[in-house]
Image (tube, helix red, strand yellow):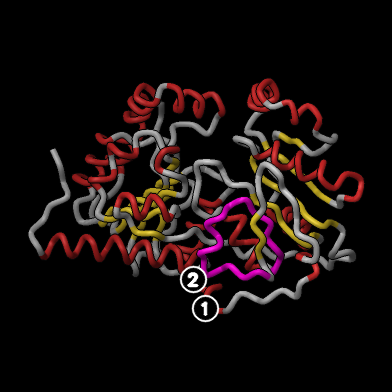
Amino acid sequence: MQPSRDPVRVHDTHRGHVLLVSPRTFSYHLSISETLRSMGYAVTWWDERASSATWYKLFLRLFPSIAVRWFERSFLARLRQLDPTSVTHVLVVKGEGLSRRVVLEMRETLASASLGLYLWDGAENVKGVSNIVSVFDSVATFDPVDAKTFGWTYRPLFGRNITVQEEIASPSQFDWCFIGTIHSDRHRVIHRLRRRYGQKARSFVFGYFQSPLMLFVRRLGDWTLLLAPKGTLSTEPMPAAEVARIVERTRAVLDVEHPRQRGFTMRTIETLLVEKKLVTTNKYILGSNLFDPSRVVVINRNKPEIPAGFLDLPYLAVPDSLRKYYSCEGWVSELLALQDSARNRATHTGLNNKEA
């Protein structure tokens, strides 16, 4: 496999050069890269996986050790092409496709750079993460339970600033909407909520599957997908601008977290930052600084019901201080500062994170 070209790269390095290794997930890697560039960093982005194709993702999940070894060759070839003195920070997001050998090579080759790992999934959902965490200067996670269990830094995700470019004629066309990937029991929860309100429901659902094969396989195990109304399931992602237009026409956004997830999705944060109400199955939002009963209601995933009157409550706006904290710049600034601090602390105390 030939080393791929880096699609996101700039050369203004007055603040440093960040090697960003992350999944290609709904263009969030582009948002992070653009934010880093706006902060004055040079950016090189690499996909943490050898391929974004469905077959590779399945192979990685089923045979992680074989898939990772296959990827090592390509990744290490790209690593040797970098100028090791130019990279000041390595930020790895998730890291599911990285082996311990690859991370150790990064540690050795980019000896002057600080290394940070951020998990935007639960540790039990990230294959092989236990093999690589000790090599990093810092580890942060969006999951409050994982942070407490493993002694990592708890740092919630960020929300993108997506604006609607046209005037919306009917801002309350829908009572609630769901736009996102269908996994675990998500569609069953959506089906129950639809059935609860019957014909009275004013809802919009766009369920995304990574490929037609994935949709076919999921239909075999989830009968509610067979009952999904026409046009509510797709194998093509919805453009961010279209998502923003639908949300603008909606009173509340539905969020159904993975059963093994405790952290807040980007959907959660972006919903509240655009001042839309959130209907979620994630009880951990109750302890968040984003929670207010005028903004958020937690529902039961087995018997979902939106309480009467919730949608009509006046919305208490999110304070500007929280908007800054939950921005992409706030997120990336904290992560880079965290790994720099850990790196400096290790250097001053004579510790060395490089392992044999």
What secondary structure is marked by label 2?
helix
The residue identified by callout 1 is: 321
Q: Can residue 280 be seen by looking at this rendering?
A: yes
Picture residue at 71% right of the left edge, 65% below the top: 276
Q: Residue at x 68, y 20 (%)?
A: 220
Give coordinates of residue 164: x percent, y percent: 74, 64
Mark 2 neighbour class, 10 Å CA radius: few under 14, some 14 to 19, many 20 or more: some
Question: Which element carries disc 1, helix, strand or loop?
Answer: helix
On the rendered image, what quadrant is the C terminus found in? top left
- Residue 20 appearing in the image: no
* Residue pictured at 76% horizontal, 65% vertical: 310
The residue under label 2 is 325
Residue 19 at x, y percent in the picture: 36, 52
Identity, as a three-letter code, of the amino acid under mark 2? Tyr
Q: Which mark is residue 182?
A: none
In the image, residue 185 above or below residue 257: above
Chain part drawn in magenta: 275-293
